[in-house]
Image (spheres, helix red, strand yellow):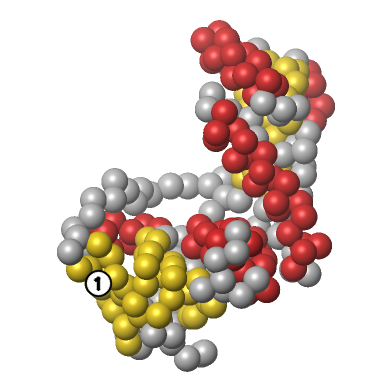
């Protein structure tokens, strides 16, 4: 492990996809004095078992839609930038409407998304079946299809973001547990860790499902709740 610095402009807590993305984008914005701390190994928290869906359709927020479009474009180019695959496969995405209310809702969303530049098409049940033969389409009214959406490997994306951050000067340290956040006069001044203290102007909590506990220890309420989930 590299030597723990005594000071950084930004300390990021958590080495999942969110933490590495913050490090990547800060470094690319010119913030070179950025340190990311991961208590175990990158992606060892909740990132490794994420679904990895890359979906631009579905939001009625222009900001969210632009972020979705940007994310897909980033994952498309990240391998060329870093030499590491993101596992991105543009296999397409279909949202299904089986009820009249849902159909009208998705039509409104699709109209808004098209205004934001999302290439979404309403397709028939037979077209859904053609694209995805395993689907049971007897009760489907319509589908909403985005050809360039798809899926990525969350571990691969994280590693590519981490490398991209390092290439721009960020420091990423694994095996360093943050044990507390230092404050003075109501402001964050740094972190305490299993390997020593780091003074910092900014501390970013990217601890995933542990972000709430970390926030509580600092007197900050993080409205986050872990929940059991399943993938088929």
**Percent position (x, y) of residue 169?**
61, 75
Q: Position of residue 176 (x, y in %)?
A: 40, 81
Q: Quadrant of the C terminus?
A: top right
**SS label for mark 1:** strand
Image quarter for residue 59? top right
Left or right: residue 147 versus residue 211 is right
Query: What residue lies at 59% left-to-right and 40% top-to-bottom?
Result: 67
Image location (x, y in percent) of residue 37: 44, 75
Residue 111 higher or lower than 5, as above or below: above
* Residue 217 position in % (x across, y down): 20, 64
Q: Residue at x 72, y 17 (%)?
A: 122
Q: Quadrant of residue 104?
A: top right
Query: Mark 1 — residue?
Result: 182
User: 98 or 13: nearer the eye?
Assistant: 13
Q: Is residue 136 left or right of residue 204?
A: right
Considering depth in this image, is 3 or 199 the residue closer to the camera?
199
The answer to whether residue 165 is visible is yes
Residue 37 visible? The answer is no
Tell me if mark 1 has few (under 14), some (14-19) or many (20+) residues whose alpha carbon lies within 10 angstroms of its own. Answer: some
Q: Is residue 52 above or below residue 217?
A: above
Q: How many marks?
A: 1
Residue at 79% x, 21% y is 127
> What residue appears at the point 43 percent right and 47 percent down from the top-left corner?
229
Q: Is residue 135 above or below residue 98?
A: below
Name the foreground residue: 175 vs 5. Answer: 5
Specify the quadrant of the image occupied by residue 17. Answer: bottom right
Q: Nearer the viewer, residue 202 or 65?
A: 202
């Amino acid at each position: 492990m590299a030597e723990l610095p005594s000071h950084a402009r930004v300390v990021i807590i958590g080495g999942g996809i969110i933490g590495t993305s913050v490090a990547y984008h800060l470094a690319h914005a010119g913030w070179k004095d950025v340190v990311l701390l991961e208590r175990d190994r990158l992606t060892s928290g909740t990132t490794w078992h994420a679904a990895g869906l890359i979906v631009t359709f579905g939001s009625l927020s222009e900001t969210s839609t632009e972020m979705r479009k940007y994310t897909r474009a980033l994952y498309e180019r990240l391998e060329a930038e870093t030499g590491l695959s993101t596992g991105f496969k543009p296999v397409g995405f279909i949202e299904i409407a089986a009820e009249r209310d849902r159909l009208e809702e998705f039509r409104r969303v699709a109209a808004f998304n098209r205004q934001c530049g999302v290439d979404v098409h309403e397709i028939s049940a037979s077209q859904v079946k053609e694209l995805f033969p395993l689907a049971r389409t007897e009760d489907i009214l319509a589908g909403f299809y985005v050809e360039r959406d798809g899926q990525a490997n969350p571990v691969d994306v994280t590693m590519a973001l981490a490398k991209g951050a390092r290439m721009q000067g960020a420091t990423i340290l694994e095996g360093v547990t943050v044990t507390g956040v230092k404050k003075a006069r109501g402001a964050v001044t740094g972190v305490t860790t299993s390997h020593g203290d780091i003074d910092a102007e900014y501390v970013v909590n990217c601890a995933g499902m542990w972000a709430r506990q970390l926030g509580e220890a600092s007197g900050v309420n993080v409205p986050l709740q872990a929940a059991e989930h399943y993938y088929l």
